[in-house]
Image (cartoon, rainbow, N blue to C red):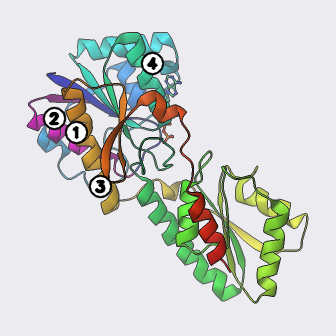
Amino acid sequence: MKRIGVFTSGGDAPGMNAAIRAVVRQAHALGIEVIGIRRGYAGMIQGEMVPLGVRDVANILQRGGTVLLTARSQEFLTPEGRAKAAAKLKAAGIEGLVAIGGDGTFRGAIQLMEEHRIPVVGVPGTIDNDLYGTDFTIGFDTAVNTALEAIDRIRDTAASHERVFFIEVMGRHAGFIALEVGLAGGAEVVALPEVPVDVEAVAQGLLESQRRGKTSSIVVVAEGAYPGGAAGLLAAIQERVALEARVTVLGHIQRGGSPTAKDRVLASRLGAAAVEALAGGTSGVMVGEVEGEVQFTPLKEAVERRKDINRGLLELLRVLAL
Ligand code: ATP
């Protein structure tokens, strides 16, 4: 393989730049040229491509977001759009692709491989951590730490004013962020999409802890855990019991920022492993890290199999919230 392409797609995640850097430099070490494709599949269709040399990726390791930009593309969802993208890749002499993104990005990659025989290796870049085949996705650790910092600040206010705070974190379909920050931030309750919310039990639990002498509480709600998110859950509770509480939605502050050491190391490792795999003739897989080891999982499995939350951690949170 002489030339490969790399792109980022879907939601940006801290550590995507570290992954791009690793792809470019590992490829260079193997004598392979790298073309950066800008704006994900949208840019692929338009032929937005730039050669990336080793110096072009200097000083990006520590930066959040993605220097290649990212986008969502409706056109790529059509066979015609994908044919245009494949034609641009072929015209540029690109023989294989490293796709950095989430499940939507990988679904697109599967189509590109099946319809146009373009080898693709996926690198899991999403703050949601919702991909099967890797213990952690690139960006998750940073997002958790960012959300945790915000929660610690809110806790100061909650404690000083003796208030209950409902804090909404990202996670439409997955509760990994909510569970992790809930445990690390000492939440009273976490509400996750994976576990049906028992509104009555949450309401009674909060009142009970007030009776036990707790004067402030944090409830962490994944945005997809309940219709209307944290505000929706609080309203449902207030229909049942008298409870005063404030709602904070953390929103996009969770997406950006300089990646943690853990995310930089993970991105460096997975980006390099993706290039080695492509160069060795492997494709149609996502590269992940499982129990500390690099592991390859078929892209189809990575997007179709559901990675469950750690139920033991959820139980622990309940015990420690006393
Ligand atoms: P994140 O979950 O972090 O937002 P993602 O990769 O899942 O990342 P999406 O917006 O779902 O983000 O997907 C990125 C792009 O991949 C879409 O804009 C679309 O162009 C393409 N894509 C998604 N699903 C498919 C599909 N089923 N077939 C072809 N292309 C797809």
Q: Residue at x 60, y 58 (%)?
A: 311
Q: Which residues are magenta?
A: 14-38
Query: Element type at marker 4?
Result: helix
Of the numbered discs 1 and 3, the one sitting upstream in the chain is 1
Query: Element type at marker 2?
Result: helix
Total marks shown come to 4
Q: Is residue 315 above or below residue 25?
A: below
Amino acid residing under circle 1:
Val
Q: CA distance from mark 2 to mark 3?
A: 18 Å
Residue 28 falls within the magenta-colored stretch: yes
Q: Residues within 10 Å of mark 3 (few under 14, many from 20)?
A: many
Of the numbered discs 3 and 4, the one sitting upstream in the chain is 4
Q: Is residue 51 left or right of residue 44?
A: left
Q: Is residue 307 above or below residue 109?
A: below
Reading the image, the residue beneath label 4 is 111
Q: Are marks 2 and 1 in contact (CB under 8 Å)?
A: yes
